[in-house]
Image (cartoon, rainbow, N blue to C red):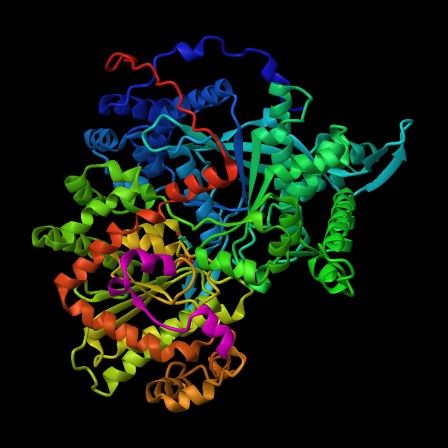
Amino acid sequence: MANTETDILCAPGLEDLPPLPMDAKSLVNDFTHHYFHHLGRDRNCRNIRYNYQALAFTVRERLIERWNNTRYAYIDADTKTGYYLSLEFLMGRALGNAMLNLGLDDAAHRAMEQLGIRLEQVAEEEIDAGLGNGGLGRLAACFLDSCATLQLPVMGYGIRYEYGMFRQRIENGRQVEEPDHWLRDGNPWEMERPEYTQRIRFGGRTECSRNDDGSLTHRWLDTHDILAVPYDLPIPGYKNGTVNTLRLWKSAATDAFDLQEFNAGSYTESVAMKNEAENITMVLYPNDASENGKELRLRQQYFLASASLQDVLARWKQRQGEVFGHFAERNVFQLNDTHPSCAVPELMRLLMDEKGMGWDEAWSVTTRTMAYTNHTLLPEALEKWPVPLFRQLLPRLLEIILEINARFLAEVSSRWPGDNERLRNMSIIEEGPVPQVRMAYLAIVGSFSVNGVAALHSQLLVQGLFRDFYELWPEKFNNKTNGVTPRRWLVKCNPGLASLIAGRIGEGFIADLGRISQVAPLADDPEFRSKWHAVKKANKERLAAVVLDQCGVPFNPESLFDVQVKRIHEYKRQLLNVLHVIHLYDRIKRGDTGEWTNRCVLIGGKAAPGYHMAKLIIKLIGNVAKVVNEDPLVGDRLKVAFFPNYRVTAMEVICPGTDLSEQISTAGKEASGTGNMKFMMNGAITIGTLDGANIEIREEVGDENFFVFGLTAEEVEHQRRSYNPAGIIAADPDLNRVLQLLTSGHFNMFEAGLFDPIIQAIVNPGDPWMVAADFRSYVQAQKRAAAAYLDREAWTRMSIVNSARSGKFSTDRTIAEYNEEIWRLRPVRPLPLVPSEPNGKL
Ligand SMILES: *Cc1c(COP(=O)(O)O)cnc(C)c1O
C-alpha cells in the first residue's frame, strides 16, 4: 500500500518558486498571516500560545524549503545512507534551535520587537519533546544535530510516543508522576506522511514448505497486523542549507483487521481492538539504565525495527529495483543500544521471506549493514526476553534467531572444540527454567561494529562483559567517546558566553569546536576574565531566579553553585552528595566554619516510578534541604534545593549557571556521561571520579583544573571483596557523625524509620556502589574546591580553561569518528536556494 502516490507528479514546477526571504519584515508578514488566516485568531486573543504557533509555522516554512532541497540533493548524489535507530530521542524544544541553525535569530528578534512581543516569552510556550529518559535519548538528539551540520545523509528512526517522559512534581518532598501529554495542542514541527505507512505483523504461526528446486519457503500466517504511520521532523544543520529527517512511527489499527471482526458481528469489539493497536506507541517506558521485561516494550521494539527496515527497503526498491546484492554498500544502521536489535533478525526475514534471498547472502548483507552501540555495563540493564514470549509474539523472528545461534555456535565450537562452557556462555539463548534471548549477544553476532561510549567503558567491555566475543572478533570492537552539540549546549543556552567568545575568536568555533582552544591564552587576560566572570554571574542570577520560582529556595549568586542533575540512580550516587551536605551542616552546627565558602547545592532528576530506593533518596534530599534551609544558624553558608521536573529545557538554564559539576558515580559504572560535558563547555569545573568520560575531561583540562577523588574502577573491583563500611565509618569521625545524624532521625523527626533502608544500604558490606569507601576522599576534594572558589581570579581562570578544552566533546567530533570508522558516508551539499529579490514575495 505504501508509495503508490509517488509515481504521480503531483506538484509540477513548485521548485521554481523563489525561496522565502529571511529578513525581519518578511517574518512579520508571515507571522501575521499565520496568526490571523491560518490559526484564525484576532486582536482580542490574549493567549500567547498562538504567538508561539504562528512563529513556529513561519520558521517551519523556511525549514521545509531546505528540507526538500536536501532530499533532492541526496537523491541526485545517489550515495550511501545511514540510519540511526533509537527507541528514544530526547529533543527538547525545537523553535530556538531551528532559528539558531537557520541563522534567523536576529531577524526573529527584530520581527517580534516590531510586533511588541517578547521572543523569549513566546519560546517558553513550547513543550519539550521528551521522548527519552536521559543520556541515551539526548545523545541521539545531539547526534542528529551533528549529522545535519556535517551534511551527512543520516536519517533518525524512532517512536512517536503519545506520552513522553512523565512530568515530575514534588509533594511533601516526594516524587509524584504526571502524564506528559505533549501533543495536546498539536505539534507544528511534525509532518504526517500517511503515504509511507507500513504494515507490522504480530502473533500468528509459521509454516515451512519445500519448493520444487529443494529450497524452503517460510510463511508467517494468521498474524494480527498493525499499521505504522510516519511523522517526520526536520533536523536543520548549522547554517548550511541541510535539513535532515527524524521519522517517528505511530501505531494505528488496520481497517482489514477491524473488518474481519465486523463481519463476524462483533462491531464494538472490533472498534475496541483499535485501542490495542494504538497502545503500542502510547507511552515511553520511564526506566533509565534498567531493562523492563514487559511484553508491550518488546512490541515497541519490534514495531520500530520492522517499520524502519520496511521503509528503507521500499525506498531502495523504488530507486534500485528488486536487486539487493549491493544493499550493504549503500546502507548502514546504527543501533542505539540493544533496544532496536530486533532489526538483525527482521532484516534477515525481509530479505529471505519477502525478497527471496538465501540464508548466506541475507546474512552477509545483514552483518555488513548493522552496527551496535553499547551504553552500559550494569547487569540489570542487559536486555533479555523469554523465549516463550518471543515465540508467541514474533514466531518467525524466533526461528531466525535460533538459526543464527545454531550457525554461530558451530563457528565457536570449530574455533574452540570441546569448550562447552564457552558455548554456554556465548550462546544467544541463555539456558534456565525459562530460556531467554540475550539481545546484546544477538546484536554483537549480527553487527560488523560494536562500540562503547568512552575510552574506559570500551576497555571494560572487551575485558569483561564481551570478553569472549572480543577474543573471537577483535576487529569488531571500537570506542566512540560521546559528545554534546555545541549549538544547543553552548550557543543557544549561553548566548552571553558564546558572544564573549565570538567577540575574541570569531564564530568559527560553533561548527568547529576545536577552535574554542583559542580562548585558553585569554585566561591570563584580567579584562577577559572579568568579562567571563560577569557572564557567569548573570547566568547564576538567571538560575537563582528559576530556583526561587521552582523550589522556593533563595540562592545567593555570590555563593558557590554546586550542581548534580541527572537521573536518580544509586550508581550515580546522589546519596554521596547528600552525605557531604549533611557533613557541611554538621560542621556549621559545631561552629567549624573557619575559611568557609558559602555554597548552594542543587540536585535534580527523575526516578523511575518503580525504583523505590531512588524515590527515597529524593525524599531524603527534600528533608535535609528543609532542615538546612530553615536553620537560622546556617544562613547563607549553605542552601539546598531539589529541582523538580529536570529535563532538557531545565538543563539549558542550569549548566550555564553552575560553578561546580558533580560527576560522582562509582568508578566503572557510568559508561560515559554527557551532562559532565555540557557543564564543562559552559565553564563549570568538575568534581568527579575516574569514571566514564570524566577521565577524558580530566586529560583535556589537566589535573589542576579538575577535582578528582575516589577509587579507580580497578580499585573498586579489588576492594569489593574485603569491603567493610562499618570499619570505615568507625575510623572516620566526620562520617560517623553524619550517620549519627541520620540514625538519630534528625531529618525525619515525624517520620520514624523512614530512611532506614538508606542507612542499611550504606553500612551493607555488599553495597555495590561503595558509598562509604569514597566519602573521605570526596570530602577532601570538596574542601579543595571550596578553597579554590575563594580565589575568584584563579577560579575564573579554571572556568575559562574548562570551556577552552571542551573541543573534543562536541558530537561533531564523535560523529566524524562514527563516519570515518563505521559508516563511511560521503557528505552531500544541497544546491543553494536561489535568493529572491529583497521582500520579493511581498
Ligand atoms: C544531558 C542530559 C542527561 C544526561 O546526564 P548525565 O549526567 O550524563 O546522566 C540526562 N537528562 C537530560 C535532560 C540531559 O540534558
Left or right of 700 on screen, residue 373: right
Residue at 45% x, 64% y is: 568
Residue name at image x 20 percent, y 54 percent:
800
- The stretch of residues the image draws in magenta is 694-719
Residue 629 visible from this viewpoint: no
Residue 377: within the magenta?
Answer: no
Q: Is residue 706 magenta?
A: yes
Q: Main secondary structure of the magenta part?
A: helix
Tell me what residue is drawn at x 52 percent, y 21 percent.
78
Give the total of numbered labels.
0
Please state which of residues 283 and 332 is positioned toward the viewer in this rendering: 332
Q: Is residue 84 shown above or below 689? A: above
**Is any part of residue 597 visible from this angle?**
yes
Task: Work out which quarter of the rendered image holds the N terminus and state it.
Answer: top right
Q: Nearer the viewer, residue 610 or 259?
A: 610
Rendered position, 332 above or below 335: above
Q: Left or right of 710: which side holds 824?
A: right
Horizontal and vertical percent position of residue 719: 49, 79
Task: Give the percent coordinates (x, y) of residue 728.
Answer: 42, 86
Where does residue 601 sit, x and y in percent of width and height?
29, 68
Q: x and y percent of residue 170 in the render? A: 41, 64
Q: Quadrant of ligand 1?
A: bottom left
Q: Quadrant of the C terminus?
A: top left
When asked about the image quadrant of residue 279, the answer is: top right
